[in-house]
Amino acid sequence: MNDIEKQIQDRLADEDSMDFEGAEDLIEAHIDEVTGGGFSLHVQFKQQQK
């Protein structure tokens, strides 16, 4: 697992303090880094209802 994957996993690991927005931002930043910004993808997680 690379560093960005670890950061995303950390933000989603604990159900009580999941940081969906932070994880989405990390994923989109990683996609920009990998593609040089030439690819657009909006990532959105469905938040579970409690």
Image (cartoon, rainbow, N blue to C red):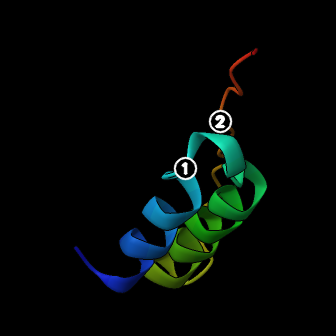
**In this rendering, position of residue 14 left or right of residue 50:** left
Q: Find numbered disc 2 in the image and state the secondary structure of the residue it sits on.
A: loop
- Return the residue found at the far top: 49
Instruction: Using the image as rendered, state which of residue 27 and residue 5 is in the foreground.
Output: 5
Residue 47 vertical placement versus 21 (above, below): above
Give the labeled residue for mark 2: 45
Residue 33 pos. (x, y %): 52, 84
Marks 2/1: CA–CA distance: 15 Å
Which quadrant of the rendered structure holds the N terminus?
A: bottom left
> What residue does disc 1 label?
14
Residue type beneath disc 1: Asp
Which residue is at the front of the view, 9 or 38? Answer: 9
Placement of 32 over or under 28, stated as above or below: below
Crowdedness near tag 1: few (<14), some (14–19) or many (≥20) residues, C-alpha within 10 Å: few
Q: Residue at x 63, y 75 (%)?
A: 29
Q: Position of residue 46 (x, y in %)?
A: 68, 26
Q: Quadrant of residue 49?
A: top right
- As drawn, the residue found furthest toward the front would be 16
Q: Residue furthest left?
A: 1
Mark 1 lies on a secondary structure that is loop
Q: Position of residue 48 (x, y in %)?
A: 68, 20
What amino acid is labelled 2 in the image? Phe
Q: Nearer the viewer, mark 2 or mark 1?
A: 1
